[in-house]
Amino acid sequence: MNASIPHAPMSQFVSDGEELLVNGIALSRLAARVGSTPFYAVDRGLLTQRVQALRAALPAGLKLHYAMKANPMPALVQHMARLVDGIDVASAGELLVALDAGADPHEVSFAGPGKRDAELVQAVASGVLVNVESQRELPVLAQASQTLGMPARVALRINPDFELKGSGMKMGGGPKQFGVDVEAVPEVLAAVARLGLAFEGFHLFAGSQNLKADAIAEAQSKSFDLAVRLADFAPSPVRFLNLGGGFGIPYFPGEQALDLAPIGDNLAALQERARDVLPQAELVIELGRYLVGEAGLYVTRVVDRKVSRGQTYLVCDGGLNHHLSASGNFGQVIRKNYPVTVGNRLSAPREVQTVVGPLCTPLDLLADRMALPRADVGDLVVVFQSGAYGASASPARFLGHPPVTEVLV
Ligand SMILES: *Cc1c(COP(=O)(O)O)cnc(C)c1O
């Protein structure tokens, strides 16, 4: 490990000198309140602050959606539903959570490949916008519209002819299971018109976890230009243009927070242009991890401290089974450490320690030889940047350990 390259400061969480505070509550007291470890804790004050800061950096009138696959915990979705303009769901299961959370169906959109017929019927019956990913969805939506006596609201998700540069995960450009290839859009729009579906607009999502503001702005501009070209083929004016998101957060040493200013400037310019070329269109961005990732911690208790041939291991009561991404097994090419600390011993002298979970696999690694406050059995190891792609993105049943608790504080 190269100790000279630091993680970005995790200054969103303040401390009382010795313990991290989660929305004002010291970590050890929070652990007592939760009643068991491991747990995820998301600070609702930080969620609110993040949305406020983002709104301040983005042009007024731009719609902000929460992509709830980042964290589908019902209490959190309920909190977010009050702060943002809409919720993006990726399954009928998420759709039910969003509706339970009080989201206005008119401001919910449903994207994702492989939507089952029953999910499409649920979407039409709910009155949400379906981001069509395949021509196959159209006759199913038409049938549901007829049966229910309400026309399906549809937007086309486009697989563009460009990629999002510098993105951790590319989700557009080249051959993809997502969206309709640009080349096929005129034909699919003709089918939308023929089937009498309620066309509302376009959805583009080029990729995820990007820390390069210029690349994000460029992808948004290209997406906008593409939508303007495709609008010529649409059966009615574009009312909804979802330009995607992909805003990243700093996870690894050397990474820095995304600079929102160039993105906000670019979106303001696009909004200005939209007034001329897509006068009825509402511009939307959809963000998952950027909204919730930095507000969450994963907390696991040290069960054993052991030394093997000179290397100190903190063996904890949870790991990969609850937090696959921090273990490095959720899409990372080279494993790197998330920001980690010992959240109830912030002032203890630092030692190089390795944090592992209880699973019988060397993949169950939360911190590889990091300089951390010296910890012992009973102490609380904290993984920062854990508010997104945590519990719901982890193999909880693997090895049969207890499930993780999730709390909104
Ligand atoms: C996953 C996903 C998102 C959210 O991505 P983040 O990296 O969490 O912001 C948004 N839109 C679509 C279509 C997605 O599939």
Image: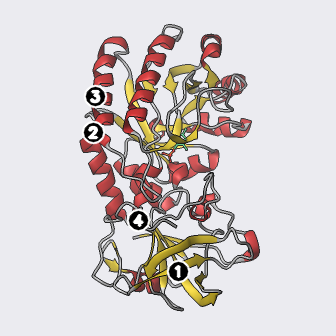
Q: Residues within 10 Å of mark 2 (few under 14, many from 20)?
A: few
Q: Amino acid at mark 4?
A: Ser
Q: Nearer the viewer, residue 51 or 5?
A: 5
Labelled disc at residue 353: 1
Circle 1 or circle 2, nearest the eye = 1
Labelled disc at residue 203: none
Residue 313 spot, x, y in % from top left: 59, 83
Residue at figure coordinates x 54%, y 20% from the top left: 198
- Verify CB contact (< 8 Å) between mark 1 and mark 2: no
Q: Residues under labels 2 and 3: Cα distance?
A: 11 Å
Circle 4 residue: 4
Does label 2 or label 3 sit earlier along the sequence?
A: 2
Residue 46 spot, x, y in % from top left: 33, 61
Residue at figure coordinates x 64%, y 62% from the top left: 394
Q: Residues under labels 3 and 1: Cα distance?
A: 47 Å
Does label 4 or label 1 sit earlier along the sequence?
A: 4
**Can you name the residue that lies furthest to the top here?**
232
Circle 3 residue: 268
Q: Residues within 10 Å of mark 1 (few under 14, many from 20)?
A: many
Q: Is residue 300 above or below residue 186?
A: below
Residue 139 spot, x, y in % from top left: 71, 22
